[in-house]
Image (cartoon, rainbow, N blue to C red):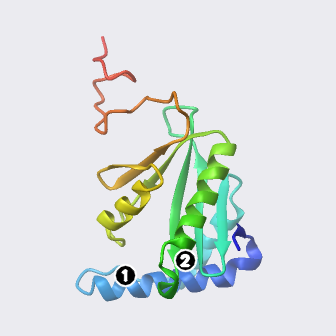
Amino acid sequence: MIRRATMGDFGAVYAMAEAYHKEYRAKMKHAALGFEWQKCASQIYNWLHAEGSINYIADHGCILGEIAEPWFSSDKLGQPFWCYVWPEYRNGIVFRSLVKAFVEEAKNRGAVYVIWDDSNGMTDTRMISKFLGLFGFRATGNVNKLFLEENYHAYDNPVYSPYCGRSGAALE
């Protein structure tokens, strides 16, 4: 069962954050980032309390994110910060359900697209991009985007140039 995460889920979410970091350290032995439990706990608290948050939890995973606006536009976008599924349940079902719930809420709250940024280097980018592609996300480097409005073609070109406008034509 998937439902909105609340402060009552803090302990479960924190346990997943610890497990996530342990997996990361095992993969990146030579360049692993440290784990500061106070900072992690504070961040989870902030995510669970944030006004624009989109947080879901399942029996075996969670997804935490928000509705945000870029600094240059009033368009809204959904942005997952972090998703975790316990290793023994990584058959795609829990992840798919969490992503679907996140995308649906982002769409209902007016997001024009969902941007999944995996630039932290802690997840296999090819794997996550391939899996997100099944939901309609398009990979653009480490970023995966899912356009939620049919007519929203502001950035059809995966490479945005500061010298081009929304249509891709050079600014005059």
Residue 76 spot, x, y in % from top left:
58, 39
Q: What residue type is disc 1 on?
A: Tyr
For disc 1, the neighbor class at 10 Å (few under 14, some 14 to 19, many from 20) is: some
Residue 75 spot, x, y in % from top left:
56, 34
What secondary structure is found at the residue carrying circle 1? Answer: helix
Does label 1 or label 2 sit earlier along the sequence?
1
Front residue (pair 161, 148): 148
Left or right, residue 148 beside residue 143: right
Residue 82 sits above or below residue 146 on the image? below
Residue 24 sits above or below residue 57 on the image? below
Which residue appears at 30% of the width and 23% of the height? 164
What secondary structure is found at the residue carrying circle 2? Answer: helix
Which residue appears at 28% of the width and 38% of the height? 159
Q: Are marks 1 and 2 in contact (CB under 8 Å)?
A: no
Q: In front: mark 1 or mark 2?
A: 1
The residue labelled by disc 1 is 24
Quadrant in the rendering for residue 158: top left
On-image quarter of the N terminus = bottom right
Front residue (pair 91, 98): 91
On-image quarter of the C terminus = top left
Which residue appears at 36% of the width and 65% of the height? 120
Disc on res. 40: 2
Residue 135 sits above or below residue 163 on the image? below
Front residue (pair 35, 121): 121
